Image (spheres, rainbow, N blue to C red):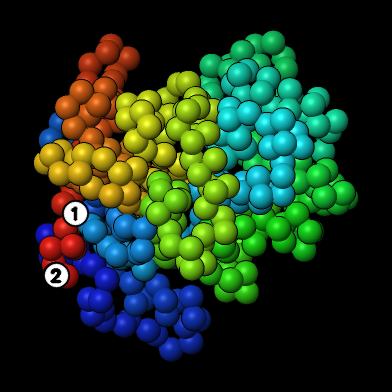
Amino acid sequence: MASGDRIAGQQEVSRVVPGSTSADRARARRTPSPILVRQIRNGVEESVHRGDVVETDLNGRMLRALGDPDRVANLRSCVKPFGLTALIDAGGIDAFELVPAELALMASSHSGEDLHVRTIQGLYRRAGLSQSLLACGAEKMPLDQLTAARLARDGEKASPVRHMCSGQHSALLLLCKLRGWDTANYWLEEHPVQVAYRGAVARAFGTTVGRLKLGIDGCGIPTYAFPLREIAKAYAFLADPDAVAPADARASVAPALRIVRDAMLANPEMVAGTRDRLDTSVMKALPDRIVSKGGMEALRGLAILAGPRANGAVVGASGMAIKIEDGDGYDRGTWAATIEALRQAGVLSGQALRVLGRYHRPSETDPHGRLSAEAIPSFELAPLVELIR
């Protein structure tokens, strides 16, 4: 591992100046994250993407890591599979005759394509709700460029139903309808539906509501922050909900989370989209083996189901959390780092790895089709299981 790389427990030198705030002091204690991806043009390193990676098992034992497993990140859209369990536990599947594709969409960050819109509109008709209740906004939506171009050509303005978070907001509105709660201001932290959602998240992460660190997400509802190792542990739980012991604090949410997992596995196009979406592409390349869910600012959670790895060994379920430090506005850093981390963990190999090649080394071409630059992964995960034995 390079000298600039580090894992949990390594000593760091504090660089605090007089008059600094607590946030300043926290930043001063952090050393730079290791480089995960290098952008190379004609042999020249133009820029780098730093970040942190951690893989744990269901009980939080670290299996592989690079960087700081205790780095705190806002879950953003990575929370969606866990929060959806609030609707399922309340009886939402029977009450609204929900099918797996609809559940997957409510756990998604969809592209706003027509198949996503039709699915949500059908859900609203069946539930007797109006789309006008959606409070997620529609700025910079839909994510799918072809759909956005068609709307612009036809002079049509995207509505909130095309927002990538409209599925999550729909789950909140359905829960309001089921419980008889007022749908006005459902996005506020103190609204009963947010209290219920928050409780589901706390149970899934094996903690209490009072210990959650809240913020405001880009779509206007609360988001929650956790250390990367806890995010990885939660995604290991998503990979195998039935493996937790009955006495485990997470056991109460396990049946609902299994339903969410299976819905996402069966409907990868609903989890993201049909074009240029890493989550969908990874899940299709590894059917019934992985749930991939990205969040804004380049956080990604990966629920890796039990199965054989590249070395032939059969390994139990695990979870992986990857965070690109700069937020990765170009996607290339998170794409390359995700595929490389899965390759090093033995999850991706052979034909599946080849199918995902364009994500592994994202490239740029000039107007004449010539290769002009590549984003190249440049890191090595530390196999911590061997280190801690």
Q: Which mark is drawn over residue 389?
A: 2
Occupied quadrant, residue 365: top left
In the depicted structure, whether residue 25 falls above or below residue 356: below
Which residue occupies 58% across, 30% down?
100
Is residue 339 at least partly visible in the picture?
yes
The percent position of residue 203, horizontal first and vertical second, equals 56, 62
In the depicted structure, whether residue 291 falls above or below residue 270: below
Q: Nearer the viewer, residue 176 or 300?
A: 176
Is residue 323 at least partly visible in the picture?
no
Q: Secondary structure at mark 2?
A: loop
Work out whether mark 1 precedes mark 2 in sequence or the reverse, and give the earlier one: 1
> How many numbered discs?
2
Occupied quadrant, residue 34: bottom left
Describe residue 175's horizontal placement relative to residue 16 as left or right: right
Q: Secondary structure at mark 1?
A: loop
Q: CA distance from mark 1 to mark 2?
A: 17 Å
Which residue occupies 37% across, 38% down?
290
Which residue occupies 63% across, 28% down?
99
Q: Residues within 10 Å of mark 2 (few under 14, many from 20)?
A: few
Which residue occupies 65% across, 60% down?
198
At label 2, the amino acid type is: Arg
In the depicted structure, whether residue 385 falls above or below residue 369: below
Identify residue for label 1.
Answer: 381
The percent position of residue 358, horizontal first and vertical second, equals 28, 26
The answer to whether the residues at label 1 and label 2 have Cβ atoms under 8 Å apart is no
